Image (cartoon, grey):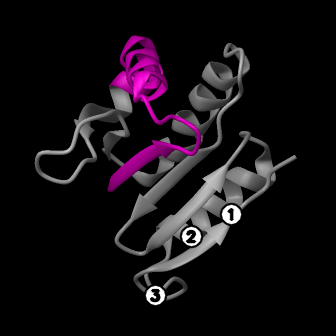
Amino acid sequence: MRLSLTLTDDASGIEASSLASWYKRDPDVRRAAAITVRANQPDGAMGGLDVVDVVLTHAVAIPTLLMSFSAWRDSRRRPQELRISTGKGSVVIVDASPETIARVVKLLGSDADAPSGESAELAGQ
């Protein structure tokens, strides 16, 4: 399962790089996912807006990824929101509550429920 992760308030790309490094240091995430960072800019554009690309070995790893994000988010001065995108749509999360995890798993794990391009905003508690 391929996911593209962006932070909703990270024009410089510094926070995305920090999140990618956090994921690469988390042994649970390392076992379940391949993590890379790429620029999300049109050709020739300058600036940040990095995207963290994640390839999960299995959907069961989604809670691990979200819990690691939540720990990273708690360590930041300015907590970030995370947008998770796939070919089926995207979702914005702010935590790793059981409700958020269940809704992300449902959105990302069900081909029939989310037509391509549909977006769901999750506010998480």
65 left or right of 2 in image? right
For label 3, count other residues whose C-alpha is less than 10 Å away and answer few (under 14), some (14-19) or many (20+).
few
Viewer-side label of 2, 3: 3
The residue tagged 1 is 103
Q: Is residue 36 above or below residue 21?
A: below
Q: Position of residue 78 (x, y in %)?
A: 71, 23
Tell me, yes or no, whether the two marked residues, 2 and 1, touch with CB atoms within 8 Å: yes
- Identify whether 88 is placed above or below 79: below
Q: Which residues are magenta?
A: 1-30
Rounded to the nearest angstrom, the CA distance separating label 3 from label 1 is 16 Å
The type of residue carrying mark 1 is Arg
- Among the two numbered marks 3 and 1 on one chain, the one whose residue lies closer to the N terminus: 1
Residue 40 lies in the magenta stretch:
no
Please say if 72 is above or below 10.
above
Callout 1 crowding tier (Cα within 10 Å): few <14, some 14–19, many ≥20: some
Mark 2 = which residue?
107
Residue 15, position as x, y percentages in the image = 49, 24
Q: Which mark is residue 37?
A: none
Q: Position of residue 68 (x, y in %)?
A: 58, 26
Q: Which mark is residue 115?
A: 3
Name the residue rendered at 68%, 13% in the picture. Answer: 75
How many labels, in total?
Answer: 3
Which amino acid type is marked by label 2?
Answer: Leu
Q: CA distance from mark 2 to mark 3?
A: 10 Å
Mark 2 surroundings: few (<14), some (14-19) or many (≥20) residues within 10 A = many
- Which of the marked residues, 2 or 3, is nearer the chain's N terminus? 2
Rendered view: 102 above or below 50: below
Give the residue drawn at x 68%, y 51%.
Answer: 101
Residue 105 position by quadrant: bottom right
> Which type of secondary structure does the marked residue at label 3 adopt?
loop
User: Which amino acid type corresponds to the residue marked 3 in the rendered image?
Assistant: Pro
Q: CA distance from mark 2 to mark 1?
A: 6 Å
